[in-house]
Amino acid sequence: MSTASHSTTPPTSSSFLRGRVASLLAIAPLGVWTVNHLWNNLSAFQSADAWENAVTTYPHPFAQMCTGILVLVPLVLHTVWGIGRLFTSRPNVRSYPLWENVKYLVQRLSAIGVLFFLGAHIFKAMIEPRLKTGHGERFVDIAWHMRHHAPTLVVYILGTLAVAYHLANGIATFAMGWGLVSTKAALRKAEWLNWTVFAILLAMSWGSIYAMWVAGA
């Protein structure tokens, strides 16, 4: 039994392979795309047109389709694997109240938060506007909701917090799972990398939210 989790089913070579593939998909393309998406959202500091051109505008419908496949397919695969992990692996922080176990528990909780947040975000920001208006979400709409609709603001603040932690901690666990770090010194560096990436992602997320909140006035 690991000090980080308690598995209710014995590991197999196929489950090990699925875990490695799911971990890889979480980094590339999902992690890379997430960082790029957060960077594009920072154009909210420039203007409404800059944000819409960076976030919701595609040069060609084919580019939009390729982006959707590149992001949504790995997202679905990683989500299915993650849901399976919720039922086959349990945190054992009660028996072993260690820091790594706490991080494991928070990682699982953040995964649930990310799942609900992304479901709402994808529908409200990408699917619904295109079904109703034929184009992506307008900056004026999301900025207004950020400023005048408290539930939207709270959901985005907490949702991006979960995304930042889940991705940052996932990078560290990816490095350990793939054998990139193994010594105590390397593990300490991975810990610093974890929190550095988390701080950067959170600053980018909340920075763009703040820019929209200001514009919504």
Image (cartoon, rainbow, N blue to C red):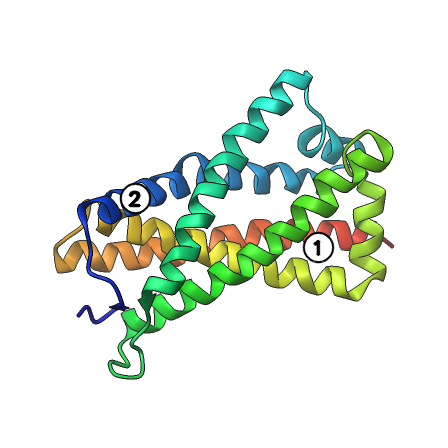
Q: Name the one closer to the observer, 25 or 37.
A: 25
Q: Earlier in the sequence, mark 1 or mark 2?
A: 2
What x and y, as percent, mark residue 125? 72, 43
The residue type indicated by label 1 comes to Tyr
Give the Cα distance between marks 1 and 2: 38 Å
- At a point 78% along the width and 34% down the height, the residue shown is 130
* Left or right for 213, reference 197: right
For label 2, the crowd category at 10 Å Cα-Cα, with few meaning under 14, some 14 to 19 and many 20 or more, is: some
Which residue ends up furthest to the left in the rendered image? Answer: 183
Residue 91, quarter of picture: bottom left
In the rendered image, the quadrant that contains the N terminus is bottom left
- At a point 79% along the width and 31% down the height, the residue shown is 49
What x and y, as percent, mark residue 179? 17, 46
In the rendered image, the quadrant that contains the C terminus is bottom right
Q: Name the one closer to the observer, 203 or 88.
A: 88
Q: Which mark is residue 210?
A: 1
- At a point 85% along the width and 43% down the height, the residue shown is 140
The residue type indicated by label 2 comes to Arg
* Left or right for 84, reference 43: left
Residue designated by label 2: 18
* Secondary structure at numbered mark 2: helix
What x and y, as percent, mark residue 100? 28, 69
Eyeballing the image, is 98 above or below 71? below
Eyeballing the image, is 115 above or below 129? below
Q: Name the one closer to the observer, 79 or 140.
A: 79
Q: Nearer the viewer, mark 1 or mark 2?
A: 2
| Residue 40 appears in the rendering | yes
- At a point 52% along the width and 34% down the height, the residue shown is 71
